[in-house]
Image (cartoon, grey):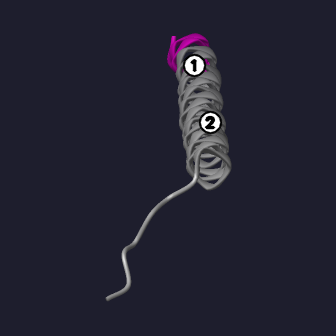
Amino acid sequence: MEQAVITPVEMSREISESGFLIVAAACFLFTSIATMILFFRWLLQNFNNVAQTQQQLLKALIELLKEHNS
């Protein structure tokens, strides 16, 4: 009858491999989330800049039309 005995060296190897896997997965998740957050903030900032530029252009156009009509 075979008995499954794990030696301390094998057990420590398994713990170190799974520990590295957990650390690598955590680093990947952190960088992925940080990248997505930075990308969405950059995209939102670009949309806001476009909206502000359009608003300024429309104000200038309204002023020009008011001057032209009076």
User: Going by the picture, which residue comes out furthest to the bottom?
Assistant: 1
Q: Position of residue 34 (x, y in %)?
A: 60, 29
Quadrant that contains the N terminus: bottom left
The image shows residue 10 at horizontal and vertical percentages of: 63, 55
Q: In the picture, residue 46 is in which quadrant? A: top right
Q: Residues within 10 Å of mark 2 (few under 14, many from 20)?
A: few
Which residue is denoted by mark 2 in the rendering?
Answer: 23
| Label 1: which secondary element | helix
Instruction: Give, as a three-letter code, the residue at label 1.
Output: Gln
Could you say where residue 3 lies in the image, as x and y percent from the top left? 36, 75
Q: What secondary structure prevails in the magenta region?
A: helix
User: Looking at this view, is 67 or 32 the one in front?
Assistant: 32
52 shown above or below 54: above
Q: Is residue 53 above or below residue 19?
A: above
Please give the name of the residue rendered at 62% of the width and 36% of the height, measured from the top-left corner.
Answer: 23
Please give left or right for residue 42 compared with residue 36 in the image.
right
Q: Residue at x 67, y 42 (%)?
A: 20
The image quadrant that residue 12 belongs to is top right
Magenta stretch, residue numbers? 62-70
* Cα distance between the residues tagged 1 and 2: 43 Å
- What residue is pinned by disc 1? 52
Which mark's residue is nearer the viewer, 1 or 2? 2
- Residue type at mark 2 is Val
Whether residue 51 is visible to the viewer of this picture, yes or no, is yes
